[in-house]
Image (cartoon, helix red, strand yellow):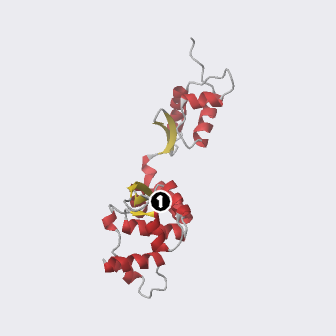
Amino acid sequence: MAKETLTLLDMQLVEALLIASDVPLTVERLKECLDEGHRIDLDAAVAALNERYRTAKHAFYISPAGKGYQIVTDNKFEAVVRNFINRNVRARLTYAALETLAVIAYKQPISKPEIEHIRGVNCAAVLTTLLERELISVSGRSDAAGRPLLYVTTEEFLRYFGLRSPADLPRTRELDELFRSGENEPQALHAVSIENSEA
């Protein structure tokens, strides 16, 4: 079978799919998107696109990912890109999400009923948001009645806040000093401080 000739349109199609997709582009996914009878050599298209990116000194390239490919930024821009992503995520996190995240960080592993006891409100939606953003994860089940799930912070949480480990979190005494007047202290952190001082 003769090798398919790679055209400019083929490269543009692959590039468009790579940009639009939030998962690696595989040969199978590419075939599903093309008209019947249209075939593109994905490896050849990626090689040709990467050569164009190198020649034009673009800040990104196409990298193998799993069984396919995805567009990634050049490593030398990692710090700037990470800062941009973290700022965007931080801006989108609600006060309730940040408060819940603080409770989990200081009391982990902790169950949903325990979090709700400290915060005084239902936190199902907030937990879902934090799980989707990979700032928390499920670490197992509690021995309490109903065996509720236990939540802990993740490596992404540490990267997000610039911490090496949960031990680097500010001590509750330091938080007390930060919120001396008590007027601006989040209610959940106040409850955590009281529980820690009573322990």
Q: The disc labelled 1 sits on which kind of residue?
A: Asn
Q: Nearer the viewer, residue 51 or 164?
A: 164
State the image quarter where residue 172 is shown: bottom left
Q: Is residue 8 visible?
A: no
**Residue placed farthest to the top in the image?**
1
Residue 197 percent location from the top left of the image: 32, 80
Q: Quadrant of the N terminus?
A: top right
Query: What secondary structure is marked by label 1?
Result: helix
Q: Residues within 10 Å of mark 1 (few under 14, many from 20)?
A: few
Residue under the point 41% across and 64% down: 161
Residue 115 shows up from this direction: yes
Figure disc tally: 1
* Quarter the C terminus occupies: bottom left
Q: Residue furthest bottom?
A: 181
Instruction: Relative to 62, say whether 196 is above or below.
Output: below
* Residue 73: x %, y % from top left: 49, 46
Q: Which of the 4 image quadrants contains residue 144?
A: bottom left
